[in-house]
Amino acid sequence: MKNLQTIVLSNQEISPGYFRMRILAPGYQKMALPGQFVMFRVRRSLPPLLRRPFGIFQIGFLPADCEGMAEKEFVELIYKVVGSGTEVMSELHHGDRIELLGPLGRGFDLDDADGDKILVGGGIGLVPLYMLAASLKDRSKTRLLIGGRSREDIITVTEFERLGVTTHVTTEDGSLGEEGLITRILERKLDKYPGARVYSCGPMPMLRAVEAICSERKVPLQVSLEALMACGVGACLGCVVKGRNHSEQNPEYLCTCRKGPVFHSHELDWDRLHQKNMEQGESS
Amino acid sequence: MSHCRPSVTKPRLAVEFAGLKLKNPLMPASGTFGYGEEFAPYLDLDQMGAIVTKGLSLNPKAGNPTPRIAETVSGMLNAIGLQNVGVEAFIRDKMPFLEQFDTPVVVNFFGNTQVEYAEVAARLNDVPGVAALEMNISCPNVKHGGIVFGTDPKAAFDVIAKVRKRLDKPLIVKLTPNVTDIRVTAQAAEDAGADVISLINTLTGMAVDVRTRRPRIANVIGGLSGPGIRPVAVRMTHQVVQTVKIPVIGIGGIMRAEDALEFLIVGARAVQVGTANFVDPNAMQTILDGIESFCIEQGIEDINDLIGTLEL
């Protein structure tokens, strides 16, 4: 948990509007846990003013090369260009200087690593699920369900398959995989594996549907939430969600940055999580 | 300015006013630094001039619905709504952590009514580790307990006078910039017994998402902070320094050492750093190092020799 002044190693568009950025990140191999995030800052004294939170896709090592360059530790982010912040990010190249604060927050709870696992991702929400999938013991029993609007929104599925994870794809327009919503596959899988545990990240309407399905069947669910945040360290109180015991008299606001971004679904008040307008569209 | 500058290697940065002894003139702005503990992993709290807490009320406060923040050009809007743990929980759970440091603790507070203001002040007056109180009469994001007192000089005078009667510790009054003439409120604060004035709180503002046609923050109107408001803050600090005799703390969009120095040169005895803490949790240390370098470069042996040296 520190502010790292570092450089971009690579930054490629992997699907229209989706970028994959590899960043030099000494120390992340030891520190980063599945589900944690970083606060990314492009440059000092230039807009955007605030850092942006991004889930960590993976951490790894770049082997030493024949010219004597030492082994390099890296972190990878995958992001979608949705506003001015991510637009500036998409224009970065190898060697550009950036700042990374992290790894931050509470990741997935892995105490219960045996048995069937179902990971449900919506679009870019698949990002924090990769490190989770990689760290689950029984990958032959791990299934990834990934949904998106169109085929462009389905990213990195082959990498999950390489981990030994079975994948199922849906798109709303039917351009890839099955046509429809991913929650339909989730119901089907839970019919077959009622004892499974579910882990999910994606847009709020999808998370709500996943929560409804899991709570009806009493299936344990962990969700990774996205939120607008200014600081990432629990000071701005911009990213709060209502906890299960929240009331006006005894407020229980949970900071997504410190108590999350991963929550057990029973910790949250799903009926009053945010105001309605929080769920409209995405904001950079 | 002299061409032959003395060689300075270790400038004295300590400032002293209203009974407060600060190692340097830098402190965080209330509401951008939590209760201090949030920043301990990134920053040596012993290096700060003071620690200023999130605003406290008599009872815990839930705050506003989300979204509560939105980025703007060179700044941000917020409408957190003074979410806080309440004064008793603060004393019990947060104060022991803050007492470990050799740094004065300034507790920011507010109330819904005059009586509540006075009660919170009286409660904090008995807490040994509290060096001073900062009274918020300027929050734009709640219906009561803030801007209604801060925008009416008579109401400001009355509530400050009530608090003054219950308080022996130094009283800092934090002013809102959302008035026609800041000098009038500043004068009222001084007349009512404030020991120090701090300014500015956020400027009220609004932003709209053109696709959803909704306000970007749930409270519709929020407070604008960040580097974009600094010229307004420097102007108001200058005006207030010229108006009152009591010390002034400058606040508004300080991101770098030079920004802090602007306030000191116009006559602020100390400054508060706000939004910069969100951007970089180590920002205050960077600013402090920058002030020290500036003094060395300029041959300033004591920071007090710089304060109020604006050339007109």
Image (cartoon, rainbow, N blue to C red):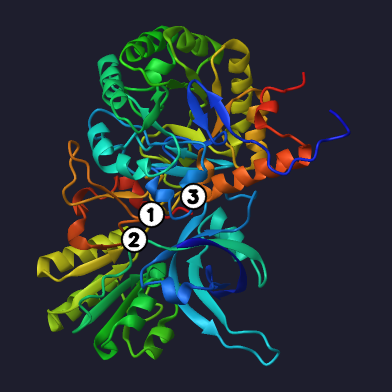
The alpha-carbon separation of the residues under discs 2 and 3 comes to 27 Å
**Same chain, labels 2 and 1:** yes
Label 1, on which residue?
A227
Q: Which mark is residue A261?
A: 2
Q: Which residue is pictured at 65% across the width and 48% down the height?
A: A45
Please provide percent x and percent y for residue B145: 33, 22
Q: Where A39 sits versus B172, above or below?
A: below
Q: Which residue is pictured at 66% across the width and 66% down the height?
A: A96
Name the subunit of mark 1.
A
- Evaluate if marks 2 and 3 touch, with contact meaning CB atoms under 8 Å apart: no
Amino acid identity at mark 3: Asp
Q: Quadrant of residue B1?
A: top right
Name the subunit of mark 2.
A
Amino acid identity at mark 1: Ala
The alpha-carbon separation of the residues under discs 2 and 1 comes to 8 Å
Residues A36 and B168: in front is: B168
Per the image, label 1 sits on a secondary structure element best described as loop
Label 3, on which residue?
B44
Q: Which mark is residue B241?
A: none
Q: Nearer the viewer, mark 2 or mark 3?
A: 3
